[in-house]
Image: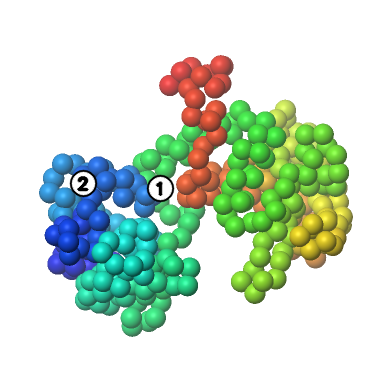
Amino acid sequence: MRFKRRTLMQIADMICGNFPHESTFFPYRSTSRLTEFFSDADTDYVHDGSTRQRWVADTLEKILAEPHAGAGKVPPTFAWVIRLLMDPGDATNEDHQRPGALAMLNAELSREGFEAYYAPDKQCYLRHLATNTTTAPEHNPHRPFSVAELKRRDQLLAYLEKASEDELIEEILLPLFRQMGFHRVTAAGHKDKALEYGKDVWMKFTLPTQHVLYFGLQAKKGKLDASGTSRAGNANVAEIYNQVLMMLGHEIFDPEFGKRVLVDHAFIVAGGEITKQARNWLGTNLDASQRRSIIFMDRTDILDLFVVHNLPLPATALSPTAWPDEPPF
C-alpha cells in the first residue's frame, strides 16, 4: 500500500497539529507527544529530533508498507493511527463529532480512494470507496511484532517458565479472556479443587445476534503430551480426558439468567507445548460431537494474544529479582 507523498504530508500536519490555534481542529503535539502518539498505536517509533512533519510522514510511509489483507485495505496499524487521530476526546474548536476534522481528513484520503467515518460505537474507521471495504484496527496475533512487543513477549515467556498453574490462570488467562470480550470469566475453585467438575474457569461470549455461548477451560502449566509416562512438569493428555468429559457433561449455573446451562466449547490450555500426538489422541477418544467442542491453546497462542492485546505484564514478570535462581538482567 502506497499513498502519495502529498497525502502523507497533509495527514502528518494533522497529527502534529501544525495549524494556528484559533482555527485548528487538531491538538498540537510536541516531539515527545508524537512518540507517545505512535506508542499508543502499538508501534515503537521514537521521534529522532528531525522536522516533525517530515518525520511523521516518513513514519506513516513505513506503516503503510506493513503486511495487510490486500486490495481495499490498509495495514491495521494505519487504521489505529487514524482512530487515534480522530479520537472524539481530542476535539478542538468543535463538538465531539468532529465534522471539521473529518472533512479535512477526508479531503486528503479521497485522493487515495478512502474515506474516514464514525460508526455507532463513536470510533473512526476507514472505508475503501471502490469496494466499500472497511479496515478496522485488529488484534492479529500473526502480524509482525515490534521490538518493544518482542521484548514484552520474552518477559512473559520467562514468567511462564516459572509460574504455577494458579498463577497461569489468575495472572494470565483471566485478564486475557476478559480483554478479548468474554463475560463472567470465573475461576471455578481451582485452589481448593472444590466444585470444578473438570474445569478451572467458565465464561461466556455474546454473539452479535445476542445469542450466548458458554465455555469451560482446563489449564495445565507445562507441556501436554501423549507419552506413556509424563516427565515432571508435563501433563499427559490421558490425565485430562475425564476432566474434558466432566466439563462437557456437567451444567453450570448462570446467575444472570438464573438457570443451569451446558458448556458449548472446552478450551484446553497449556503453558507449554501441546503436541500433535496429544491433540490426535484426545480427538480419537472423544466422539464426533465432543471433538468439535474442543479448542486448543498452547504457549505460543498465549504469548501472541497477550502481546497484541497490550495487556500489562504481571508484576513479577517485570522484576529482575523475582526469580532468585536466575542471574539478574
Of the pair 145 and 138, the residue shown nearer to us: 138
Q: Residue at x 82, y 52 (%)?
A: 247
Q: State the quadrant of the N terminus.
A: bottom left
Query: Measured from the top left, where is residue 140 in percent x and y?
Result: 47, 57
Rendered residue at 84%/62% (across/down): 259
- Horizontal and vertical percent for residue 266? 74, 55
Under mark 2, the amino acid is: Ser
Side (left or right) of 10 relative to 207: left
Helix or strand or loop: what does disc 2 sit on? Answer: loop
Q: Quadrant of residue 232?
A: top right
Which residue carries the number 1 mark? 145
Q: Secondary structure at mark 1?
A: loop
Say whether residue 20 is left or right of residue 227: left
Quadrant in the picture for the C terminus: top left
The answer for how far apart the CA atoms under marks 1 and 2 are is: 26 Å
Q: Which residue is mark 2?
A: 30
**Where is 298 relative to 208, above or below?**
above
Q: Is residue 149 visible?
A: yes
Q: Earlier in the sequence, mark 1 or mark 2?
A: 2
Q: Is residue 298 left or right of residue 238?
A: left
Q: Position of residue 5 (x, y in %)?
A: 16, 65
Tell which of 141 and 50 is nearer to you.
50
- Tag 1: amino acid: Phe
